[in-house]
Amino acid sequence: MPKMKTHKGLKKRFKVGKRGAVKRSRAFASHLMSSKSSKRRRHLRRVALVVGPEAKKIRILLGAERKARKSEE
């Protein structure tokens, strides 16, 4: 069976941490920032985590799920 290719769209939007946590940036932080409060802008700078079944799907499409399983064995 051939190797699975990395999903390039997900590669640009998500990063997988050392322990397998899937990190993403927050929405609504690209423009029209002057109308948003300082607190809201500050919180939009923080990284958010993807949890649950979505995180597993993303790890598989990025090729990180297989690496995590290999290191466990």
Image (cartoon, grey):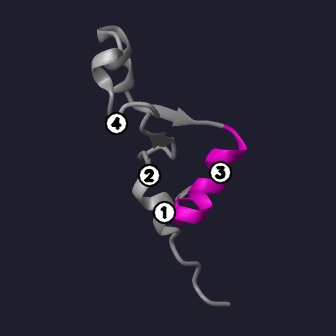
SS label for mark 3:
helix
Residue sitting at x 32%, y 33%: 31
Quote the CA–CA distance across marks 1 and 4.
18 Å
Say if the magenta span includes residue 42: no
Q: Position of residue 14 (x, y in %)?
A: 45, 50
Residue drawn at x 62%, y 89% as measured from the top left: 2
User: Residue at the location (67% across, 46% down)?
Assistant: 54
The crowding category of the residue bearing disc 3, from other C-alpha atoms within 10 Å (few below 14, some 14 to 19, many at least 20), is some
Label 3 close to label 4 by CB (< 8 Å): no
> Can you identify the residue that label 3 sits on?
56
Q: Position of residue 19 (x, y in %)?
A: 48, 43
Residue 33 visible in the picture: yes
Badge number at residue 9:
1
State the image quarter where residue 32 is shown.
top left
Residue hosting label 4: 30
Judge whether 26 appears above or below 7 on screen: above
What residue is pinned by disc 2?
Answer: 13
Q: Which amino acid type corresponds to the residue marked 1 in the rendered image?
A: Gly
Residue 28: image location, x then y, percent: 43, 31
